[in-house]
Amino acid sequence: MKIITVKNSDIAGIKSADIVMDCIKKKKKFVLGLATGGTMIPFYESLSRLINNKKIDVSSVKTFNLDEYVGIDRNNEKSYFYFMNKHFFSKVGISRDNINFLNGNAKNLKLECKNYEKKIAKDRIDLQILGIGRDGHIGFNEPGSDLKSKTREVILLDATRKDNSRFFNGKIGKVPKKALTVGIETIMKSKKIILLAFGKNKAGIVHRFLHGSIDKNIPASFLKKHRDLTVILDREAANELD
Ligand code: F6R
């Protein structure tokens, strides 16, 4: 595992975008695993700027997003699909056919998850970018998730709904109670993983994740078994590390 600490989230966004871009340039049909949330915004800003300034052809890059709320239409501005369009897909030339997303409004959610899992298994993710929740979740794999978990429907914990209520005008009651998420086993099969964490709110979980033992109550801790994990922190998130 490699840990990189930089001054702030803007610099971390640039650093992570540089690493991702180097990887994309090396392989024609690159498969990129993506995440949403506040942490990802500086990363998507830097990556889209880099792609456009350097005129990199990303039309054949394939993407798989980690998660989506259940019961929210993808055109709804609270959906993760909408977030991705706003912050990344609308800015770069990735072919629409190459964008893969879980549909939280599918009639048969079990089948939706099974088919998504199959698609990822077929393509194999070259690089997965991740954030981390204050309870240690990755994707929507909440504490208690198994190392062997696959893409599935999950119930969100109140702590996560509370954290995400900032995207729902501060109203926890408006945050969906369920979501679809790629599983931990699925994430672990990615060839390379980059986890980003910024801000003082993340300092406690970053300490527990990096210094604690591997424990299903901190799902991110499973990542320490991965052979190619890079953790990029800003100073505030790294504040409690030794
Ligand atoms: C969302 C996802 C989540 C977030 C985590 C942190 O696609 O994968 O695990 O990374 O909830 O969210 P922020 O960045 O908003 O603190």
Image (spheres, rainbow, N blue to C red):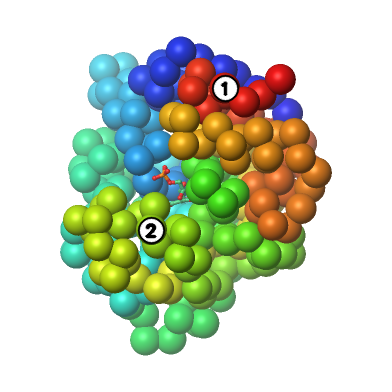
Vertical arrangement, residue 158 with respect to residue 23, above or below: below
Q: Secondary structure at mark 2?
A: helix
Between 172 and 190, the residue placed more toward the observer is: 172
Q: Is residue 239 above or below residue 180?
A: above
Q: Residue at x 44, y 29 (%)?
A: 199
Q: Give the residue furthest to the top.
A: 7
Q: Which residue is mark 1?
A: 239
Q: Decide which of 200, 60 is in the foreground and name it.
A: 200
| Mark drawn on residue 38 | none
Sequence-first disc among 1 and 2: 2
Residue at point 47%, 30% (across, down): 200
Callout 2: few (<14), some (14-19), or many (20+) C-alpha neighbours within 10 Å?
some
| Residue 76 position by quadrant | bottom left
User: Which residue is denoted by mark 2 in the rendering?
Assistant: 162
Amino acid type at mark 2: Lys
Q: Is residue 36 visible?
A: yes
Q: Could you tell whether 186 is left or right of 14 in the image?
A: right
C-alpha separation, residue under disc 1 versus residue under disc 2:
24 Å
**At 69% across and 57% down in the image, what residue appears?**
217
Using the image, determine if residue 169 lies above or below residue 225: below
Is disc 1 surrounded by few (<14), some (14 to 19) or many (20+) residues within 10 Å?
some
